[in-house]
Amino acid sequence: MNDSRMTASMERNELYCDIRSGRLPAILCAGVVLALCLASRFSPAQTPMELSRWREFSYARQTNQVGGRLTAIDGVHRGGYIVLNDGSFARLWSSLVHTTSPEGKEFYQGYVMYDFDDGSSILAKVDVSGEPRSKQTGTMIFLAGTKRFKGITGRGTISSWMPAKWDLYAEVEASYSVATE
């Protein structure tokens, strides 16, 4: 056996012994823990996830029909209010695109801003779909916030329906956390 083959064989035996003795898994585990500790130093601390539920009532303040041969597309700016579980209110402003497909499905996507009495606000992105004149469901993702919602992250689910053209009623259940300073 030449020297290079003998060295390679000895290295394999040492690696096998390291694995059998538990030293290699321990070293790998320590490396992962060290990487997680370093990564957590650079991410902002978050408060625990908080579950919140609210109801939204909004109406179209302005609609712009974009149209189309295959689908009906409308740009809608909404105004309204939300009622939180604790009985407090906030103002709602949204800019959404409503689409009706040839198959009869309805969709709306866009951005919603919630303004609270204490000057705090939340910006969220919504994406909802369903049958016309019935319940529609979708998701909400929190993008940004100010004051008590600064650094907000989280998401929620939306159940909505339109009892009349461009009037919207929605129930939202969301989990979020905010950055602590």
Image: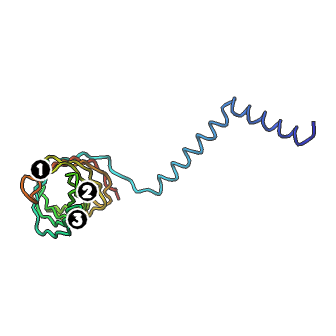
The residue to which callout 2 is attached is 126
Question: Considering the numbered disc 2 on the image, is that residue within a helix, a strand or a loop?
Answer: strand
- In the visual, does 79 lie left or right of 143? left
User: Would residue 142 appear left or right of 87 to someone viewing this image?
Assistant: right
The numbered mark, 1 or 3, whose residue comes first in the sequence reads 3
Look at label 1 and name its amino acid: Arg
Q: Write down the residue under mark 3.
A: 69
The quadrant of the picture occupied by the C terminus is: bottom left
Q: Residues within 10 Å of mark 1 (few under 14, many from 20)?
A: few
- Which residue appears at 17% of the width and 64% of the height? 93
Between disc 1 and disc 2, whose residue precedes?
2
Q: Nearer the viewer, mark 2 or mark 3?
A: 3
Which residue is outermost to the right?
Answer: 2
Q: Quick one: 120 or 158, which is closer to the camera?
A: 158
The x and y percentages for residue 160 are: 16, 50
Q: Are marks 2 and 3 in contact (CB under 8 Å)?
A: no
Q: Which residue is mark 1?
A: 133
Few, some or many C-alpha atoms within 10 Å of disc 3 (few <14, some 14-19, many ≥20)?
few
CA distance for labels 1 and 2: 19 Å
Q: Amino acid at mark 2?
A: Val
Residue 27 visible somewhere in the drawing: yes
Q: Is residue 12 left or right of residue 26?
A: right
Is 50 rendered above or below residue 127? above
Question: Looking at the picture, how far across and down is residue 150, in whole percent?
Answer: 29, 61
Q: Secondary structure at mark 3?
A: loop
Residues packed near mark 2 inside 10 Å, few (<14), some (14 to 19) or many (20 plus): many
Structural distance between the alpha carbons of marks 2 and 3: 25 Å
